[in-house]
Amino acid sequence: MSEKISLEVIGMSCTSCAASIEKALNKVDGVKSAKVDYPSKKATVELAEPVPGEKLIQIIKDTGYDAFLADESDKKAQIEEQHLKREKNRLIAAWLITLPLTVKMFAHMGFGYMLFSHRAELLIDLFFSFIVIFVIGYPVIVTTIKSFAKLSFSMDSLIGIGTIAAYSTGLLNYFGVDIESFAIVGAMIMAINFIGNYMKELATGRASQAIKQLLELGAKEAHRLLPDGSTEDVPVDSLQLSDIVLVKPGEKIPVDGVVVKGESSVDESIATGESIPVDKQKGDAVIGATVNQQGALQIQVEKLGKDTFLSQIIKMVEDAQGSKVPIQAFADRVTAVFVPIVMAMAVLTFAFWFFFPDFAAGIAANFSTIIPWINLDRGKISMALFASIATIVIACPCALGLATPTALMVGMGKGAMAGILIRNGEAIQTAQEIDTVVFDKTGTITEGKPTVRSINIHDHDYEQEFLQVLSSVEASSEHPLAKAITDYAAEQNIKAVNVEKFQALSGKGLEALVKGRKIHVGSPKYFGTLDIDFSVMAELIQAEQEKGHTVILLADTEQFKGYVAIADAVKVDSKTALSDLHALGIKTIMLTGDNRRAAQAIAAEVGIDKVEAELLPEDKIAVVKRLQAEGSIVAMVGDGINDAPSLKQANVGISIGTGTDIAIEAADITLVSGSLSGVVKAIRLSKATFRKIRQNLFWAFFYNVVAIPLAVFGLLHPVIAELAMAFSSVNVVVNSLRLKREKI
């Protein structure tokens, strides 16, 4: 099994930066594959042979960025905060210098106002613009130089080339070349770039808040019980397996464990998305970061660190947010070749204005009355540089590269907070296309355990005794249905009485003496062999059996007294969830190994469109394959080991979080709570996420399609181009953040 190393990357300004790092890492001997995700600032490197993490970090640094091992998570927040502070300081410093230069430039352009001679003013422009571009903007310039050395270009490369080209015009002018100085324009481009970078850092930081919020959910301290019964407050990180911790009402449960003493209700909404507290007593499992609400609980530690439920969720969300979706492949291909194409376009733009100045100027002249910065008196070299610099700056692929990953990051984070864990990006794209949902029955639509559905007593004088006698006899039985009866009796606060001469007749029923009277408990078939007449309720019993219920009769001293009907209870929200799926135009099918009669009864109760019963696991796969062959996009929802093959076969596998680990591992999406409403939410989330992705891609493409021709024909000022580029990138991230407000 190949080793994976995760790295946190600092200093990226867009997805083309991530592509440059990815390209450099993939060239390293021993690296099988490298994937760098800009929104999460994470690099995942899969190794074919051992490679030191320090070597990979150095490769990233050589590309112009900073990095550290993801395992050093305690550093992450501090380093990110320092980076954001540096970006803010650069922004402030750049504008403290650039703003006066800008005012001076517009004063000269608008009113011909000059403080000093042309040569002296040009020297001032060159000096202060040098500080902005080459001192404050040093990281951008270094990245640009390194990108040429490695022939791997990014957005910083375009900014660097544009500002250096603009600054060079000032130098040429100073030494006597007949060309207009755009030195201040170069400083403005760099300063505006810092605005865009800082805003993107803030916005993408908000986009990745789901992980930060999850990390902050855990308790920091725990009350560890000592052998003498006293407690000591210790950091959660210092707890050991089998330690017992005390959790008081209102406190967060610090670890995953099991209740060894106490009873309470626990708010598990952070894990399941369900707001109703869950009752807990001795033997029940609890999840770290959930909130104890009422009584004190003593909990034995069962999982620590990366094995805890919360850590697993965080890892799953991080992996999913860093994964790519099919729709992103096209944007990535475009982004990968965009920078060289932009540079080629800039060269062609320069050549167009240099070799065909009259034709180019003729086009620009048509707009000179409405666009104030068009100045055809500049000369052909100045106009050629003006247009080519604007082309370099405006055509940055940043917005295009951000369109998909930022929406995915927000969408998957929103899903995690709602108890919907998405394992990979492809699943969230496919989920929006689902037209058929296939359900397992037991444990998925139903609770997966038998419960008493009805009681019907023939002898009304026996009503007070019926459930007590029945539960007392069943208490001695090991049959699964016996527990359903005894649990129901306990809920009704009915106490069992003494039972004598208990006998379980395999496959038939039970016999015992209760209060000196002989009691028979069993199926209608068993009662038929005893010649006990239950014809008075035969029609009711038959109706129960037609619903798929198991009927258990009771007789006292050979006299039929009544029956209970037992069935696997339907989950409380199954009917609503299926109704919501139908409202979305989705067909529903139930696949089960249960008998057809029971399956059809459940299907009728919840509103399933079609039932296929008495199936083996391989039969379920065959049904899914058949539906796919017919052109359906199929989601399979299941919880058991026997569902795992079908979950893998389906276009999207959705596992119930309360099910088996194998089913969860086989699925693309896990519903932590086990509630079927999560299926509806997952599909709605997918649709909402992809609505944002399409909006982002449209505006990214539209912006370039409109803006690039304007730049080529000299109609776009380089400063306006840089402002528009920065705005488009921030707009994409902010639009993705609106997904947080979508109702699913």
Image (spheres, helix red, strand yellow):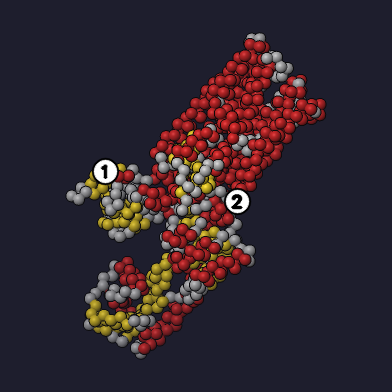
Visible residue check, residue 308:
yes
**What residue is shown at x 68% (from left), y 29% (from top)?**
390
- Residue 708's place in the image compared with 126, above or below, is below
Where is residue 487 drawn, in percent x and y? 33, 68
- Residue 592's place in the image compared with 633, above or below, is below
Q: Which residue is mark 2?
A: 326
Visible residue check, residue 409:
no
Q: CA distance from mark 2 to mark 1?
A: 49 Å
The outermost residue toward the top is 117
The outermost residue toward the bottom is 531
2 and 1 marks in contact (CB < 8 Å): no
Where is residue 672 drawn, in percent x and y? 44, 56
What secondary structure is marked by label 2? helix
Please state which of residues 377 and 12 is positioned toward the viewer in this rendering. Answer: 12
**What residue is shown at x 68% (from left), y 18% (from top)?**
172
**What residue is shown at x 24% (from left), y 74% (from top)?**
497
**What residue is shown at x 59% (from left), y 20% (from top)?**
129
Q: Residues within 10 Å of mark 2 (few under 14, many from 20)?
A: few
Where is residue 271 drawn, in percent x and y? 41, 52
Amino acid residing under circle 2: Pro
In the image, taking residue 225 as reference, residue 586 lies left or right, namely: right
- Residue 143's place in the image compared with 327, above or below, is above
What secondary structure is marked by label 1? strand
**Which dot marks residue 544?**
none
Please state which of residues 66 and 194 is positioned toward the viewer in this rendering. Answer: 66
Between circles 2 and 1, the one closer to the viewer is 2
Amino acid residing under circle 1: Asp
